[in-house]
Amino acid sequence: MQKKREICGYRDKLDKTLSSPELTNHETLKSLLRNQLEECDENILDKRTDDVSKLLSKLRSVSMTDHQVSKLTNDGDWKLKHDLEDCRVMYREGLDGSPFHTLLVEGYMDGPIHECLCVSWESTLYKKWWPQYAFPPFRILKSTCLQKVGVGEQICLARMKVPWPLTEREMILHYFSFEYFKDGLVVILLNTISDLNSIGVSSTDIIIPESPDAVRMDLVGGFVLQKVTPQRSYFRTIGDMDIKLDLMPPSLMNFISRQLIGNGFRLYKKVRQSGFMILFVLMSGRYLSDNMFPYLNVTVSCFRS
């Protein structure tokens, strides 16, 4: 019962932050992003503001108490796929004619927010915490950063082997981070891209590789991490996903939500708690300060105090 009250408190704190005037007012949000991005093209700033605003709106819209979750699942809207003390996974079918299906994951992790963020941000760590199954076959074949675009922004590739008879799947992901220091909140946009123009980036140094032997999936979403205590963080993730199938078999969605995401969360926590993770965070300190958290002196005092 005590754990349940704590989790409700974490959820309420996140909902209150997401509904704060600074994050719900478009112009105020744009001003916060302008301060973070500093010298930034106005068109790119407008796009980042729109994207962050849409993600925050989605995350606000799925705020649910345990009673509401029970009611919604009984009504057939959201389906509760995985429900444990520290994490729950929910699924919602796409609208008629839409290829997108929505997954929602939220829970808490015992660890400082900067360590949890490091595991989430570093694509090279995906093989450490995404489940690797022999049957049904699933494993991460490749996960790498193609290019660091700017402060708190990168383009990554993730490729995976999936159960037969499906062809290998991959995603070209655009990551963008936004820090709201006042309430210890970090927002991460995760969207697939097909070209650089879609994110307002023009550079001859970035080449999106061709993959004729893999099917590219689409993902629109992201997640938030919030410091609730110095050694505990709360997260909420939402994603609209198109895995490029004409029909989504219930068995496949159960596998994704229960096996991949549910067990992936367990492995994520183990990686975060391992001595390897602590060493990695220490070694990554310069990267985090120079490329992700431009105001390290502010961020460290905010997230570690």
Image (spheres, rainbow, N blue to C red):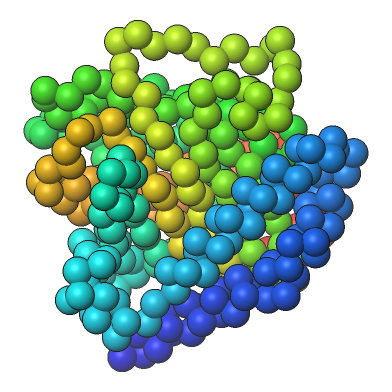
For this orientation, the residue located farthest to the front is: 97
Q: Quadrant of residue 137?
A: top left
Q: In the image, is residue 300 above or below residue 294?
A: below
Q: Where is residue 119 drawn, in percent x and y?
A: 50, 45
Q: Quadrant of residue 226?
A: bottom right
Q: In the image, is residue 106 above or below residue 284?
A: below
For this orientation, the residue located farthest to the right is: 39
Q: In the image, is residue 108 above or below residue 43?
A: below
Count of labels shown? 0
Q: Where is residue 212 drawn, in percent x and y?
A: 35, 8
Residue 86 vs residue 31, the one in the foreground: 31
The quarter in which the N terminus is drawn is bottom left
Q: Is residue 114 visible?
A: no
Residue at position x 84%, y 40% in the image: 42
Residue at position x 57%, y 34% in the image: 174
Q: Where is residue 69 drawn, in percent x and y?
A: 29, 77
Residue at position x 67%, y 50% in the image: 50
Q: Quadrant of residue 269?
A: bottom left
Task: Specify whether 109 is left or right of 95.
Answer: right
Q: In the image, is residue 296 above or below residue 85?
A: above
Q: Where is residue 136 drawn, in percent x and y?
A: 11, 34
Residue 61 vs residue 158, the one in the foreground: 61
Residue 286 vs residue 140, the one in the foreground: 140
Task: Specify whether 160 is left or right of 119.
Answer: left
Residue at position x 41%, y 50% in the image: 239
